[in-house]
């Protein structure tokens, strides 16, 4: 039976939803409860990964060194992972994380610039650490099946695990069914990081497993950027109901974690459940990274622009993660 790795990204991607304010007490308790759920991997850090904490993108409440240290002390058999985007993370960051006990480095870049991951991946291999390639904004390589040639190149480079990250929440189940059917014979392991803009994050993840994916990213309460990620509790319950193989999830322990986290989000961060807002739908429709939504809304109001036209124009500009600073000028210009 093929093992399906369940990777919990709540304490990383979920940081987007609370302005990167995840605190050590929450991390400690969360990790303790996570141990009994059947999760295989726990990802920690700033929403944009290690080295990304900044004034322009948002500063983390705690340093990644403190966050990783407290997580490592409280995780038992669960592996510790970090997200590292080329351009943010440095070799020094990789070394520090390695010293703190990080097991898996997920090296990401916007999909058209996938080769930017090579240097960090090579460095991780040099220090004997497991490195995965994360194809962010993966919808940008969907047209004309560009992903097939990219997967072949990644394999030739020696990459053994790739994650399709639906950063914009663009894909529907039939998209992923096509993608994974086309690559599952290419001899590389693949996984999915789904966003829930179109309310299909869970189903996209199920489709991935049915087509041979060995990694699925989930988040408790669905917490993540914009409309959030694959909702862990829903995914786990459906996986049990469908009798999907390769996972050993404990629903009772997952629901205990969920109840704690719901109360903690309300008390500490004044955060209610994630909802799919109109701006989440617009960003997904036009292929815009979910974290861009607050800025598009803000500057549309500031410059008295039609918000629907703002999203359309930003979508035509094909901005990718890291280009947030261009949003005000694009919206301010006449359209």
Image (cartoon, rainbow, N blue to C red):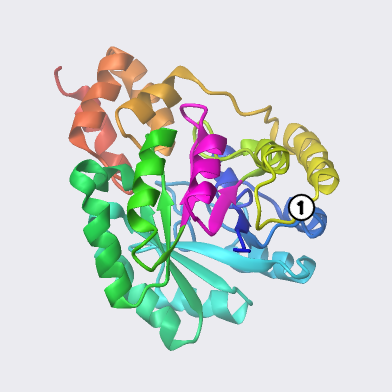
Task: Please tell me which residue lies in front, 49 or 177.
Answer: 177
So how many labels did they put on this image?
1
Q: Secondary structure at mark 1?
A: helix
- Residue extent of the magenta highlight: 191-218
193, above or below 31, in the image: above
325 displayed left or right of 273: left
Please state if 290 lies on the left or on the right of 228 as rendered: left
Figure quadrant of residue 247: bottom right
Report whether residue 171 is seen: no
Q: Is residue 61 left or right of residue 201?
A: right
Task: Give the image location of residue 199, x and y in percent.
Answer: 52, 27
Judge whether residue 311 is colored magenta. Answer: no
Along the line of sight, the residue nearer the viewer: 9 or 330: 9
User: Can you name the residue that lies furthest to the left here?
Assistant: 334
How far across and down, in percent of the image, does residue 71 sit? 71, 64
Of residue 278 and residue 178, the one placed in the foreground of this image is: 178
Q: Give x and y (percent) for residue 83.
A: 49, 61
Does 215 appear in magenta? Answer: yes
Q: Quadrant of residue 6?
A: bottom right
Which residue is the site of mark 1?
Answer: 30
């Amino acid at each position: 039976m093929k093992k399906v790795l369940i990777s919990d990204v709540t304490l990383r991607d979920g940081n987007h939803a609370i302005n990167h304010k995840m605190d050590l007490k929450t991390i400690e308790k969360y990790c303790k409860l996570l141990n009994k759920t059947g999760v295989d991997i726990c990802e920690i850090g700033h929403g944009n990964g290690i080295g990304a904490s900044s004034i322009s993108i948002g500063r983390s409440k705690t340093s990644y060194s403190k966050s990783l240290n407290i997580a490592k002390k409280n995780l038992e058999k669960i592996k510790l992972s970090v997200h590292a985007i080329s351009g943010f993370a440095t070799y020094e960051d990789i070394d520090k994380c390695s010293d703190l006990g990080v097991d898996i480095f997920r090296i990401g870049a916007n999909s058209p610039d996938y080769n930017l991951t090579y240097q960090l991946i090579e460095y991780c291999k040099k220090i004997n650490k497991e490195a995965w390639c994360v194809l962010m904004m993966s919808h940008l390589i969907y047209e004309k099946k560009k992903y097939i040639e990219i997967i072949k190149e990644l394999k030739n480079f020696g990459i053994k695990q790739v994650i399709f990250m639906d950063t914009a929440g663009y894909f529907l189940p039939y998209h992923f069914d096509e993608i994974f059917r086309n690559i599952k014979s290419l001899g590389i392991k693949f996984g999915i990081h789904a966003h829930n803009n179109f309310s299909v994050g869970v189903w996209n993840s199920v489709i991935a497993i049915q087509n041979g994916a060995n990694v699925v990213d989930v988040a408790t309460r669905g917490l993540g950027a914009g409309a959030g990620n694959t909702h862990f509790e829903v995914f786990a319950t459906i996986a049990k109901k469908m009798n999907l193989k390769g996972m050993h999830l404990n629903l009772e322990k997952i629901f205990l974690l969920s109840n704690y986290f719901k109360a903690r989000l309300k008390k500490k961060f004044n955060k209610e459940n994630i909802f799919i807002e109109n701006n989440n739908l617009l960003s997904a429709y036009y292929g815009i990274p979910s974290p861009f939504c607050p800025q598009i809304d803000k500057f549309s109001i500031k410059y008295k622009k039609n918000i629907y036209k703002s999203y359309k124009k930003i979508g035509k500009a094909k901005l990718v993660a890291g280009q947030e600073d261009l949003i005000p000028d694009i919206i301010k210009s006449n359209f």
